[in-house]
Amino acid sequence: MIDDWTTLAGESPASLATGAELIARWSEPHRRYHTLDHLAAVLAAVSQLAEPAGDLAAVRLAAWFHDAVYDGRPGWDEERSAQLAQSRLPGCGVPASRVSEVARLVRLTAAHDTLTAGDRNGAVLCDADLAVLGRPGYDDYAARIRQEYGHVPDDLFRMGRAEVLRRLLAVPSLYRTERARELWEERARANMSGELAALTGMRG
């Protein structure tokens, strides 16, 4: 994937070092879902949804950084990932305004339902990040998420996961771009509703 990174960020020594660091982070052994496969899938989805973006390079950079720090601590992971972007990107020659936008976008992925109307870059990134919800293989995705939270007892995980699903299902439209709604909305809602029913039907 280093070629994807250098196409975006250039081949300076700092850019090559940052690309290698990001690939190493996404390859950490404790990850089960938030892996290089997820990164590649998000980047591919960004390309599918690219048209509305005002700064597509910022969106793609944010995809690279959005789970670069992943310890299974919602909110904390995104904040640390945003800080990593702010630390590394200036040395890669990325303008300050774009660095700020990348960090903003990374922080936005902590809670997709906080996306405001008219945020075109945010819509493309968040929709790409959530594309998995409406694609084949949802059960495998859900199983891998559970593995990443293996340290959490079953009853607490079910409660927390159910709350996440309820929050996502409560918004009028899960996806903000027209193309993502066409591609994934119906199936995503069916997938999440099925998982929620299974979680809430379980007993300790």
Image: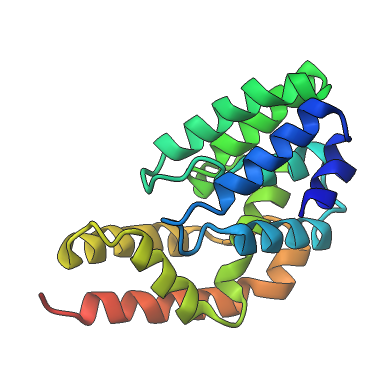
Left or right for 29, reference 108: left
Q: Quadrant of residue 59?
A: top right
Q: Quadrant of residue 46?
A: bottom right
Q: Taking the image as drawn, is residue 49 in sight? A: yes
Q: Taking the image as drawn, is residue 118 in sight? A: no
In depth, the one of 45 and 92 nearer the eye is 92
In depth, the one of 200 and 97 nearer the eye is 97
Tell me if residue 128 comes above or below residue 103 in the rendering.
below
Percent position (x, y) of residue 13? 81, 28
Q: Residue at x 46, y 45 (%)?
A: 70
Quadrant location, the C terminus: bottom left
Quadrant location, the N terminus: bottom right
In depth, the one of 128 and 77 nearer the eye is 77
Percent position (x, y) of residue 116? 61, 39
Q: How many marks?
A: 0
Q: Residue at x 64, y 38 (%)?
A: 21
Left or right for 128, reference 25: right
Left or right for 198, reference 139: left
Percent position (x, y) of residue 132? 59, 69
Percent position (x, y) of residue 24? 60, 46
In depth, the one of 89 and 115 nearer the eye is 89
Q: Residue at x 24, y 66 (%)?
A: 158
Left or right for 43, reference 8: left
Q: Residue at x 46, y 80 (%)?
A: 139
Tell me if residue 158 comes above or below residue 16 in the rendering.
below
Colouring:
rainbow
